[in-house]
Image (cartoon, rainbow, N blue to C red):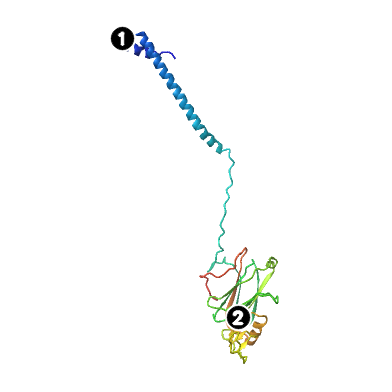
Amino acid sequence: MGYTEHDLRAALAERVQGGPPDVREIVRRGRALRRRRAAAGVTLAAALATAVVLLVPRLVGIGSVDKVPPMAATVTLRPHPTPVLSGSDRSRPLIKEHRSDRLGVATTITFQRLSHYTSFWVICADPKAFVVVDQREGRKGRSGMSAGPCGVGGFVISGGSPASSRLERPGSVKVWVLPPDPPVVRSGRADNEYRCKALRKDLGLCDGMYLSAELIRPGVVERLAALIGPERGRWKIQIHDRVGATVPWTPGPDEPVTLD
C-alpha cells in the first residue's frame, strides 16, 4: 500500500512547525498508518463473511418455500343434530295427513315411506279419547301395535326400521280412536292380574276402562270397536318422514296441537 499525498503533507506540516523534517519519522508513521488500514480491512472482510454465512441459511429457507409442494388441508365437519321443524314451516317432514269425525271405527291410511323411520301423530278433540295404532300392514303374527290415551299433546309413536326393499312400496297404518266413555262390561268375576271387578280381556276392558296391554292383542280392538259402534268425534293423524332420516321425528315443544 503506498502513501497518499494527504498523508505526506500532514506529516511534513507537523515537522515544519517544529524544525526541519525528520524523514525517518515520516516513514515510520506512514508504515504504522498502513498497518492499521490493513488490519481494518481484514476485520471488515471477516465481518462480511460472517454475515453472509448467517444470512445464507435464511435465504435458503425462504427460497425453498416455493419448491415445497402444497399440502392438502383436511376439514372434518361435525354432524349437526337433526333439526325439529315446527309451526308454519312447510319444510317439516309431513308426508300425509288424514282427518276424521268418527270414533270407534277402523281407518286405514296409506303413504309412501321416505326413510327407515316413520312417525305417527294422532291428535284428538277430546284428550280422553283412546288410540290404537296397528303398523303390521296386514301381516299377522308380527308385533307392531301401540295403544294409549290421546292426551293433550296427542299420541305419538315411531315406526320400526323396515327393510330397504319396503321403502319403495306404499306403506299403510290402521288407526282406531275410541270414545272416552266405553261401555261398562261386567264379567261377573274378579281378576287379580288387573284388580278388576269386571274384566273382559276379549274386549280389552277392565271395569269399563281400556286396557292397553289387551287392546294390542290380535282381534281384541276389532271386537271392541264392533261393540261400541261409530260415534261422532273429531281427530286427525299426521305421518312424518324425511329422506335420509337417522332418528324418528317427534313434535317439538312449540309444535301447535290443533285440529285446524
* Residue found farthest to the bottom: 188
Q: Residue at x 44, y 21 (%)?
A: 41
Give the image quarter of residue 112.
bottom right
Count of marks placed on residues: 2
Q: Residue at x 31, y 12 (%)?
A: 14
Q: Which mark is residue 156?
A: none
Please tell me whether mark 2 sits on a helix, a strand or a loop: helix
Instruction: Answer with left or right where residue 21 lies relative to residue 204.
Output: left
Q: Position of residue 164 (x, y in %)?
A: 68, 65
Q: Position of residue 51 (x, y in %)?
A: 47, 30
Spatial CA span between label 2 and label 1: 134 Å
* Residue found farthest to the left: 18
Q: Residue at x 66, y 73 (%)?
A: 172
What amino acid is found at the position of numbered circle 1 in the picture? Val
User: Residue tagged by mark 2?
Assistant: 212
Alpha-carbon neighbours of circle 1 within 10 Å: few (<14), some, or many (≥20)? few
Give the image quarter of residue 67.
top right
Give the image quarter of residue 211.
bottom right
What amino acid is found at the position of numbered circle 2 in the picture? Ser
Q: Which mark is residue 16?
A: 1
Instruction: Answer with left or right where residue 181 lies relative to residue 169.
Output: left
100, above or below 5, in the image: below
